[in-house]
Image (spheres, helix red, strand yellow):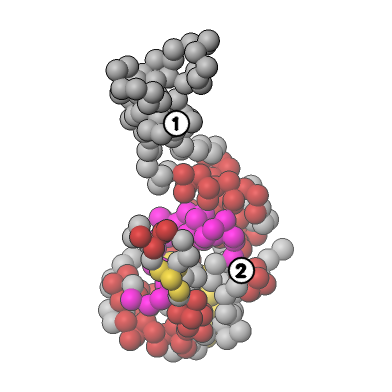
């Protein structure tokens, strides 16, 4: 049995009351289901790509058969002994090229996707799970972390930063800043030069300016409660992301999920 109530904090980090913890936070941890759900979501972003069906085949090359004392590879007509067409020769076709027909999009039953989302939400309410994922949570006063609705009306980055400092979350943003580095490999040439850790997630019920105010903070993401999914709550298939719940979004979980089955 999990916690029944959680502390409600104002913008200065002071506990001003208590809120009832939705029953969804009692969902058992299912990292196996969460992993399948995250991989399924990720697969929907992959763009199909393949080779031209005639690549390496635009040639007159034919094999001359046996008995000539030469290899049986296809050779161009009228151009000496130039081998073409075969996978093992210069300018030949690829052996097993990627094809656009490949089935990339994975599917997951609706109930399994819902279980993954419920389990990922529940993991955000465990300080042990969040710490094991690598977040800096030494100064976070309570889990799940719930803040008053005034938080989603902030319109300046400085104000958001001050509130996150009061809530003990700023240390995790500095952790993300320190993790930022140049990616190893060819991804540097393909529009993804930098690589960094994942920071806090802010779940809101209404965007009154917080999304624009928080987007310049390293690793911080803002999402509407109705747009939550397993990947946002468990990036890289690892559950336990440090999550700040706005009170109205937190209460919405009651009507959206009710309780565990």
Foreground: 150 or 163? 163
Does the segment drawn in magenta span residue 242?
no
Q: Which mark is residue 133?
A: 2
The answer to whether residue 69 is left or right of residue 189 is right
Rendered residue at 56%/41% (across/down) = 111
Crowding at label 1, few (<14), some or many (≥20) Cα neighbours within 10 Å? some
Q: Which residue in the protein does label 1 denote? A: 89
Hey, which quadrant is residue 222 in on the image?
bottom left
In the image, residue 125 lies at what x, y percent? 60, 68
Q: Which mark is residue 225?
A: none
Crowding at label 2, few (<14), some or many (≥20) Cα neighbours within 10 Å? some
Q: Is residue 258 visible?
A: no
Tag 2, which secondary structure?
loop
Position of residue 13 relative to residue 251, above or below, is below
Which of the two discs, 2 and 1, labels the residue nearer the N terminus? 1
- The residue mark sitting in front, 2 or 1, is 1
Hey, which quadrant is residue 207 in on the image?
bottom left
Tag 1, which secondary structure?
loop
Rendered residue at 68%/56% (across/down) = 28
Q: Is residue 182 visible?
A: yes
**Start and end of the magenta stretch?**
216-240
Rendered residue at 39%/20% (across/down) = 75
């Amino acid at each position: 049995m999990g916690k029944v109530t959680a502390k409600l904090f104002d913008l200065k980090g002071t506990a001003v009351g208590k809120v009832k913890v939705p029953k969804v936070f009692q969902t058992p941890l299912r990292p196996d289901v969460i992993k399948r759900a995250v991989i399924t979501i990720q697969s929907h972003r992959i763009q199909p790509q393949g080779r031209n069906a005639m690549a390496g085949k635009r040639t007159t090359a034919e094999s001359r058969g046996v008995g000539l004392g030469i290899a049986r590879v296809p050779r161009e007509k009228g151009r000496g002994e130039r081998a073409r067409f075969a996978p093992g020769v210069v300018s030949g076709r690829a052996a097993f090229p990627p094809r656009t027909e490949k089935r990339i999009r994975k599917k997951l039953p609706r109930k399994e996707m819902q279980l993954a989302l419920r389990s990922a939400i529940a993991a955000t309410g465990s300080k042990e799970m969040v710490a094991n994922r690598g977040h800096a949570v030494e100064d976070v006063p309570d889990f799940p972390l719930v803040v008053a609705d005034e938080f989603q009306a902030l319109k300046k980055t400085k104000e958001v930063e001050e509130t996150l400092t009061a809530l003990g979350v700023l240390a995790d943003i500095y952790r993300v800043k320190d993790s930022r580095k140049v990616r190893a490999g060819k991804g540097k040439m393909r529009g993804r030069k930098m690589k960094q850790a994942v920071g806090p997630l802010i779940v809101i019920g209404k965007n009154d300016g917080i999304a624009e105010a928080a987007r310049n903070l390293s690793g911080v993401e803002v999402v509407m409660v109705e747009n939550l999914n397993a990947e946002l709550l468990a990036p890289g298939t690892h559950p336990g992301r440090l999550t700040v719940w706005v009170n109205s979004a937190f209460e919405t979980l009651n009507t959206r999920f009710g309780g565990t089955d």
